[in-house]
Amino acid sequence: MKQEEVKKTIRDVMPARDESSYSSLSASCAGNRIEVISGSIGYGDEEIKSKPESSTCHGTNPVIKSTSSDITFANRWDHFLARLGVKRNEHLIVPGLHALGKPAKDSPVFASANYTLSFDALRSALAGIDAYILVLDTRGINVWCAAGKGTFGTDEIVCRIEAVKLHDVVSHRTLIVPQLGATGVSAREVGARSGFKVEFGPVRAEDLPEYLKNHHAAEEMRRVHFTLPDRIVLIPVELNNFLIPLLVASIFMLLAGGYTAAAAAITAILSGLVLFPILLPWIPTTDFSTKGFIVGGLMALPFALNAFYGMIGEALWLRSGWALAYMLTMPPVTAFLALNFTGSTTFTSVIGVRREIFRYVPKMAWMSGIGIILIIVLSSMKIFGGM
């Protein structure tokens, strides 16, 4: 499939939020499960994790490393840690040429990132197939994000082909590259500089066995999905990233307003980290920020009503103040976390995210700032007997 056709396919199947949503890469690009055509490590003696050096592409006397399609307990533990965001920069596979099974000179060659989740998805999908895997030095970043950052790109492919002396290893001149790496790879330039024809495979590694039958990808193989399981698998790393802010906010609200206020802080944060990804397709509006405001507002409403009607015996102004404080602080917190989730999706864009940042973040700051000041004032009056 031609590179232009691949790029057009990606553009057509992604639900666009604005004209530039084809870029499919936003602020943080946390990555997700569907970016794989490539996948993690075998962790054998010849596949020791190590941080790649910038000069590894120019090594001499290249060694072909052995791997298999078996996913071991060590692999699964590595996947678990990667999903949690633990040791984020250490889920690496050594760049170079890896032999899957017992490949011959006419065996297919696949390109992959040196991110463990990517490499493992690829080799496990190729069970029973003898092949070579050309692992690029993407600094431990998945294919899609690395393509946007330039580490999974034309120069790295050409350099890696030369470094491993791929011309001497195989008799053919075809390299199967992940479809989602197309944004960083010029097939024409790779062919001109290395002599290898770039063939863009399907989006998902699991479709490769079918693809290899005739080297043709059906329309469904070209389609990018972002289903409920795809979104849920991203939640653990989001929780890990915001664990400390969650604890700080909970402690602050506990001291300021008691257990109910602490529960409100936890609810606002978990709504953005857990509830929002799950409900994403069904929340009205297109902007992630407004979607977050909706979710946060709905979750804040019970706390506001409880403060107004449940604080029996308290003055009207105090009950109103706490109700207002909940409505001012909870929605912007959830909205901010919803905006942050754009970096994990398959269809947001840098321009779209930047537009949301300038449009909504000031509003989030004002609302939360006023709400926090109100909470401090109400708490101070309670402590010093100003009620």
Image (cartoon, grey):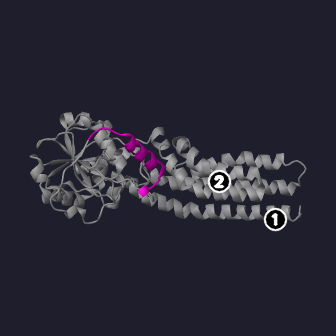
* Residue 331, numbered circle: 2
Q: Is residue 69 magenta?
A: yes
205 lies left or right of 349: left
Instruction: State whether residue 215 is above or below residue 48.
Output: above
Residue tagged by mark 1?
Answer: 380
Residue 287 visible here: no
**Residue 99 visible, this angle:** yes
Earlier residue among tags 2 and 1: 2
Comparing 195 with 74, the one in front is: 74
- In what quadrant of the picture does the N terminus appear? top left
Q: Amino acid at mark 1?
A: Ser
Q: In the picture, residue 254 is in which quadrant?
A: bottom right
Residue situated in front as seen by the camera: 236 or 24: 236
Q: Residues within 10 Å of mark 1 (few under 14, many from 20)?
A: some
Q: Quadrant of residue 37?
A: top left
x and y, in percent, of residue 63 in the image = 18, 54
Q: Which residues are magenta?
A: 68-88
